[in-house]
Image (tube, rainbow, N blue to C red):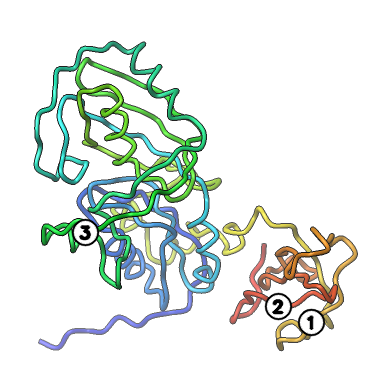
Amino acid sequence: MTQVRIPRRPVDGVFLLDKPLHLSSNTALQRVRWLYRAQKAGHTGVLDPLATGLLPVCLGEATKFSAFLLDADKGYCATVRFGAVSTTLDAEGEITPVGPVNFDADRLREVLDGFLGEIEQVPPMHSALKFQGKALYEYAREGIEIERKVRRITIHAIELVGFDGDTAVINVQCSKGTYVRTLAADIGAVLGCGAYLTGLRRTRTAGFEVADALTLDALEAVAEDARDGLLMPPDVLVAHLPRTVLDDADIHRLCHGQPALAAQNTVRAGENDAIIRDFRLYTEDGRFIGLGEIRKDDLLWPNRMLANKPVSA
């Protein structure tokens, strides 16, 4: 039987996915792309197969702005088991008992408070970080330990939600680059009993919340001709940047790689900066056309521009 090839189509926007357990971020991404029959798709930060929760998926022109979410703060709900350690820092690894759990919730809160603010972390061996072009987890599977550089990350908030004497549920708000598995292991080390991660759910990234996300099953249940209505426009990924409205002449110049005169409401951030700052660019009738940057010449240059027709804000 000849397999029917599903035609792809140009579709631009951001879909908030609630990623299920035991599914890789890339597999989840491809499922969303297939359901939308999108020509192009990308996500905004990997979630491990054992993690669930918020995974914004960018379609079409929105992929040009996905990097802004890679750098955004994240929120997680973590389930941590005390009294043992894991070779992978989570439930997938080899578990080794360490010591009795002889602390109460007040002591645990005290330890958690010690992790607030800027702290140092060593990335885990079982991670996708690359060394000489190869992921660290590949070395780990071969029994090879690679020295990793200490990273400085920030824990903005950490809250104990529940503790039953062996397992804790903890909410964490953190900067990019934070490994919650490492955080769990470090908490266990301070308490002297060991700890490892048994569950992880991403609850937020940038201004997006998992409460607004849909599962793959929910997306599939929506009629195909209604799915586009679930997409947010590409400029939601850069909503934190200042907005500038341009006339047709300047838009024409920018779309052809030429600079436009900076709008009156753009302000230089500093005299010594080669590239001052980014701006969201819009037509006079409110259509988003991409990003521009003010340079030392005081001109507004194109940065990431939409290849398709401008889309409504």
What residue is at 45 percent from the left and 58 percent from the top?
Answer: 15
In this view, 264 is above or below 300? above
Picture coordinates of residue 244, whole percent (x, y): 79, 64
Which circle, 3 or 1, is nearer the viewer? 3
Whether pointer 1 and pointer 2 mark residues with C-beta atoms closer than 8 Å, the reply is: yes
Whether pointer 2 and pointer 3 mark residues with C-beta atoms closer than 8 Å, the reply is: no
Q: What residue is shown with label 3?
A: 137
Q: Quadrant of residue 270?
A: bottom right
Q: Relative to the observer, which residue lies in front, 44 or 103?
A: 103
Choose the circle earlier in sequence order: 3 or 1: 3
The amino acid type of the residue labelled 1 equals: Pro
In this view, 10 is above or below 265? below
Question: Which structural element holds mark 1?
Answer: loop
What residue is at 28 percent from the left and 49 percent from the top?
Answer: 124
The amino acid type of the residue labelled 2 equals: Pro
| Tag shown at residue 302 | 2
